[in-house]
Amino acid sequence: MKKETKLKGKEFLRAFLICIFAVTIPLLWGVYAFQAKKYTDLSKEISDLERKQEQLIEENKRLVSDISILTSAERIEKIATEELGMHKAQSEDIIRVEMTGERK
């Protein structure tokens, strides 16, 4: 009787291990598929962000170039003289004001 019980115990253990093995393999494949999908999504997001970064860098270069053009002394002087009717001040046009005394 003990031998028969021992044999049934071994068969049960063997069947149990086979069931665990049979269940574990599909679960591992599922985890692998989930991780592969996650990796693919993250790779696409990284590519999109790198492309956006390149666009922003190019736009920033263009804006810096525009700023340097718009703030050039020649352009400002041209607008001041031609559009606003201004002229460079002569030394006799400059009035110096000195403040003396305490401020309250």
Image (cartoon, rainbow, N blue to C red):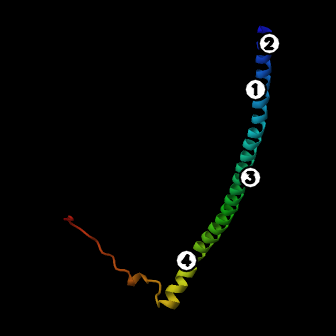
Q: In this view, does 99 lie to the left or right of 94?
A: left
Answer above or below: position of 34 versus 64: above
| Residue underneath mark 3 | 40
What amino acid does circle 1 point to?
A: Phe
Q: Residue at x 65, y 67 (%)?
A: 61
Which label number is shown at residue 25? none
Residue found at x 20% / y 66%: 101
How far apart are the alpha carbons under marks 2 and 1?
A: 18 Å
Q: Nearer the viewer, residue 34 or 64?
A: 34
Task: Estimate the spatial distance between the alpha carbons at disc 4 and disc 3, rounded to whole Å.
Answer: 52 Å
Residue 84 at x, y percent in the picture: 47, 89
Mark drawn on residue 16: 1
Q: Disc 4 residue type?
A: Ala
Q: If the image is split into quadrants, where does the N terminus sit?
A: top right
Q: What element carries label 2?
A: helix
Question: Residue drawn 57% across and 80% down?
Answer: 74
**Of marks 3 and 1, which one's residue comes earlier in the chain?**
1
Real-space Cα distance between discs 3 and 2?
A: 54 Å
Task: Please identify, in this view, whether the residue under mark 3 or under mark 2 is nearer the observer.
Answer: 2
Circle 1 SS class: helix
Q: Residues within 10 Å of mark 1 (few under 14, many from 20)?
A: few
Residue at mark 4: 73
Q: Where is residue 22 in the image (x, y as percent from the top left)?
A: 79, 34
Which is nearer the N-term, disc 3 or disc 2? Answer: 2
Which residue lies under the disc numbered 2? 4
* Amino acid on which the number 2 mark rests in the picture: Glu
Q: In this picture, is 93 found above or below 15?
A: below
* Depth order, front residue of 17/57: 17
Task: From the top left corner, tell me how far across and down residue 37 is, in percent.
Answer: 73, 50
Disc 3 versus disc 1: distance between alpha carbons? 36 Å
